[in-house]
Each structure stands twice: as structure tokens, then as C-alpha cells.
């Protein structure tokens, strides 16, 4: 009898001991110490550091693709205008401002835009447009009434006091000898030249530099992302590029 009681007591002690040990193991398994937390934070920081450049480049590619798509639609509208009117927008067109910016008023209806121009005219804006003016009042061209809320300029520059600059304003499409090389509409940066994509000057608009890449549309309707020539002194739009560049402003 005493032997049976002794065995039962030992079994109870064994169960209690096992339960106590299991609880300790479970407690240890479910614990999360501060050093463990630091390890997790470090691992997450490393993942972010590795992934961030890829995400940044992906967003930049998406914005550039949108800029090119918008310019393609604008170029199409300008070509439709030229076909219906028999010629491209010219100096005698009824626009309230400089032709190279306010050509928009002649073609925007083809893109379904009615009424006064506004920042809501998304198709005329490049997502990376940062404008040009410096200071606290600076804002993108696409948000500025001074530039008719657009990032893209027509190849019809008319700057007072600077006559004779090459362009195709008022020309019939049939008179353009090389439409695949002749600029039609381009992002403003091609005039400097500067770039809003893969820029060597970061967010700054100075200095101008040769081979700055810009989104441009040609008289045959295609759009490309190309380097723009700069002679180191004069704005790009004031003269034709030297041999080796696959674009031109006029004939």
C-alpha cells in the first residue's frame, strides 16, 4: 500500500515538474527581447535601403512614360489642326499670347478640352515639370497661366527682338522635307537645354548643358527622348544643332 502511494506521489511530482518545464520553454519561446527588436529593425532598414533606389527609378520611368504619352497626344492634335487648316499654327493665328505656348488654344479642342485653360488640362502637363523661375513664387509651367498651363511648346518660337530663329510656324506639312527629324512640339527643357528626367543638375535649372535629354515630338507624329545640342552660350532653340544630332528646327 505504501509502495502504491509512493509511486503515485512520484508520478504527481513528475507531471508537475514536466508542466513547470514546459511553461518555462513556452515562456522563453514567446518572449521578444529588446535586442531581438533591434535586429528586426536593422533588417527592415536594410531591406528599405536596398529597395528604395529600385522604387525611385521605377517611379521616374513611370513619370517619363506619362510625359511621353501626353506629348504624343498633343503632337497628334497639332497635326490634326495642320491637316484641317492646311498649315501648322502661325503668327497670324488668333491667340492671346506667344504662339509657342498659346498654340494650345488652337488644338486643345481636339483633345476634348473646352472652356478656359487650367491646371486640370493634364494632357498638356509633364509630371516632372518644375518650371524655370526661381524663388518662392516658382511653380511648374503646367500650373502657370503665364504659360497657358502647359509643359510643351510648339516649334514656332516668336521672341520679340530675336527674328530669324528656325521654326516651322505656319508651314504646310507637305513642305517639311524631313518630318522624321523636324521638331513639332517638345518639352520646354529642349529650349535651354535642361532635363527633367535623368537630370545632371538635380532639381536646379542651372546651368544649361549639352546633351541634356528631353522628350520631343516630331512632324511625322513620333515621340522620342533625345540629347539636345548646346554650344555653351546660346539657348538651344536659337540655332540648328551641329552634325551628329538627329533633329532639327527647320529646313
Image (tube, rainbow, N blue to C red):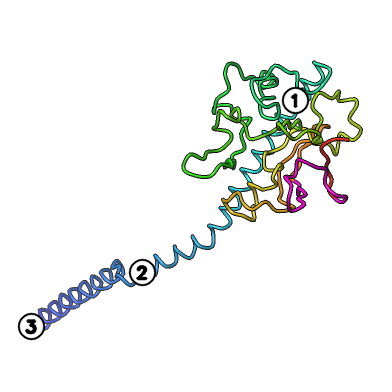
Q: Secondary structure at mark 3?
A: helix
Magenta region, residue range: 226-244
In the image as oriented, which residue stretches furthest toward the front?
A: 161
Q: Nearer the viewer, residue 221 or 194?
A: 194
Magenta stretch containing residue 227, yes or no? yes
- Classify mark 2: residues with Cα within 10 Å, few (<14), some (14-19) or many (20+): few
User: Quadrant location of the N terminus?
Assistant: bottom left
Counting from the top left corner in percent of width and height, residue 19 is at 21, 71
- Classify mark 3: residues with Cα within 10 Å, few (<14), some (14-19) or many (20+): few
**Which residue is identified by label 2?**
38
Which badge, 1 or 2, comes first in the chain's sequence? 2
Apparent side of residue 95 relative to residue 8 in the rendered image (left or right): right
Apparent side of residue 139 relative to residue 104 in the rendered image (left or right): left
Magenta stretch containing residue 64, yes or no? no
Mark 2 vs mark 3: give the one in front: 2
- Identify the residue shown where x is 57% and y is 19%: 116
- Identify the residue shown where x is 48% and y is 39%: 137
**Which residue is identified by label 1?**
78
User: Quadrant location of the C terminus?
Assistant: top right
Q: Quadrant of residue 45?
A: bottom left
- Identify the residue shown where x is 15% and y is 80%: 10
Q: Is residue 190 above or below residue 4?
A: above
Inter-mark Cα distance, 2 to 3 = 57 Å
Which badge, 2 or 3, comes first in the chain's sequence? 3
Q: Secondary structure at mark 1?
A: helix
Amino acid at each position: 500500500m505504501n509502495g502504491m502511494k509512493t509511486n503515485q506521489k512520484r508520478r504527481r511530482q513528475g507531471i508537475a515538474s514536466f508542466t513547470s518545464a514546459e511553461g518555462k520553454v513556452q515562456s522563453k519561446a514567446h518572449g521578444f527581447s529588446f535586442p531581438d527588436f533591434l535586429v528586426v529593425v536593422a533588417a527592415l532598414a536594410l531591406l528599405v535601403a536596398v529597395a528604395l533606389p529600385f522604387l525611385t527609378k521605377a517611379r521616374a520611368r513611370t513619370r517619363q512614360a506619362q510625359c511621353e504619352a501626353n506629348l504624343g497626344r498633343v503632337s497628334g492634335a497639332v497635326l490634326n489642326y495642320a491637316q484641317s487648316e492646311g498649315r501648322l499654327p502661325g503668327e497670324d493665328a488668333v491667340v492671346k499670347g506667344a504662339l509657342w505656348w498659346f498654340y494650345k488654344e488652337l488644338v486643345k479642342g481636339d483633345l476634348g478640352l473646352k472652356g478656359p485653360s487650367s491646371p486640370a488640362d493634364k494632357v498638356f502637363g509633364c509630371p516632372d515639370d518644375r518650371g524655370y523661375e526661381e524663388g518662392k513664387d516658382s511653380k511648374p509651367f503646367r500650373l502657370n497661366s503665364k504659360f497657358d498651363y502647359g509643359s510643351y511648346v510648339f516649334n514656332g518660337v516668336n521672341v520679340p527682338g530675336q527674328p530669324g530663329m528656325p521654326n516651322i510656324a505656319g508651314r504646310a506639312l507637305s513642305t517639311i522635307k524631313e518630318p522624321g527629324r523636324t521638331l513639332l512640339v517638345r518639352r520646354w527643357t529642349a529650349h535651354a537645354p535642361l532635363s527633367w528626367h535623368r537630370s545632371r543638375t538635380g532639381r536646379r535649372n542651372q546651368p544649361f548643358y549639352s546633351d541634356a535629354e528631353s522628350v520631343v515630338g516630331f512632324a511625322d507624329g513620333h515621340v522620342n527622348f533625345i540629347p539636345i545640342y548646346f554650344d555653351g552660350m546660346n539657348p538651344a532653340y536659337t540655332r540648328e544643332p551641329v552634325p551628329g544630332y538627329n533633329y532639327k528646327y527647320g529646313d
